[in-house]
Amino acid sequence: MLLTDYFRSKKDITWDYAVQCGVTHGVIRLPEDEQFDITDESHWLTVYKRFTDFGITPCVIEPMPNELHNSIKTAAPDRDSCIEKVIGMFPIMQKLNISTICFNFMANIGWLRTNSHYPERGGAFVTEFNMSEFKEETNVITSDRLWDNYTYFIKAVIPEAEKYGIKLALHPDDPPVPSLSKTQRIFICKENIRKAVYDIVKSPSLGVTMCQATYHIMGEDLEKVITDFADKIYFVHFRNTTGRPEHFRETFHDNGDINMAHIMRVYMENGIDVPIRVDHVPTMAGEDVNNPGYDAIGRLFAIGYLKGILDGLLN
């Protein structure tokens, strides 16, 4: 496994912490301001150099830029121009040796929590989702429409991704519930994701982001999912939780339902050697809950915990 961490495009303290922990590769979020042109190689080079000068080699883009996301998922009038911009990323990514895009197909609402102050061990805070507390009204989009829109997108971009050796890694819906208000969701179970990456288009450029806790929350047999999807796992979110789709919470990486060392062994037994990053960490003492799931100090524990498991299994 290639140890990575998640970085926003402007340097902050998480960059220092990650490099001090021995992280050398980055899952990067591209700038989302109007000045950044996603199809302009010079704009990419400015960001890329910012990372490499700091000792971080970008290897995964996450997420697909938000300016493109929802138009594609909802089939907005500018969908085709957004798809062209996605395709325009591929030759630049190839030149920079960034081979993977983590994308999702959650329309209108992305990953969602209803509480960012659930108390965990020692008074740390983690995020929680409770369907009974979700009150937001959303726009109507049906599962059939989402399938149509996903199929349209994949059939447009995958042939181009193949030309440049780019891999698109589909992230499951989080939370994996059938709908949020009037917005339905489709990537909420193993079989739907199997259909999405094996049946609609058969290509080595289409696979999955194994967000392991989301599959666990679904109620799926995580070991079987990893084994069955082994040839399609292009990126791993190392994360632990407890609960089920309608009500769950994050945990410290060593304090949830998943036996993390055992699951890492399952990846290795199946020959999975891809970028991996810790995800959804607690907010620790002394931190403000300004960036729930992505605060800085909790990542120190999570990265160290992941490194310990990797070192223990590899040596």
Image (cartoon, rainbow, N blue to C red):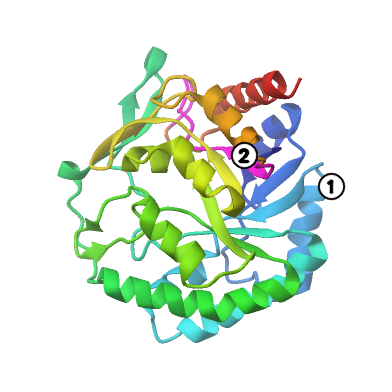
Vertical position of residue 192 compared to residue 85: above or below: above
As drawn, is 277 to the left or to the right of 148?
Answer: right
Write the residue at 62% across / 26% down: 306
**Can the viewer see residue 292?**
no
315 part of magenta stretch: no
Q: Amino acid at mark 2?
A: Asn
- Magenta stretch, main secondary structure, is loop
Q: Dot 1: within a 10 Å radius of its alpha carbon, few (fewer than 14), some, or many (20 or more) residues?
A: few
Vertical position of residue 183 compared to residue 51: above or below: below
| Res. 270 mark | 2
Write the residue at 84% across / 47% down: 53
- Mark 2 or mark 1: name the one nearer the start of the chain: 1
Vertical position of residue 160 compared to residue 307: above or below: below
- The residue that disc 1 covers is 53
**Can the viewer see residue 213?**
yes
Nearer to us in this view, 311 or 298? 311
Residue 239 percent location from the top left of the image? 49, 34
**Quarter assignment of residue 148:** bottom left
Secondary structure at badge 1 equals loop
Residue 276 percent location from the top left of the image? 63, 40
Nearer to us in this view, 189 or 255? 189
Residue 6 percent location from the top left of the image? 61, 44
Farthest residue in the right direction? 53
Q: Which residues are magenta?
A: 272-288
Farthest residue in the top direction? 122
Residue 204 percent location from the top left of the image? 64, 64
Q: CA distance from mark 2 to mark 1?
A: 35 Å
Q: Amino acid at mark 1?
A: Asp
**Quarter assignment of residue 88:** bottom right
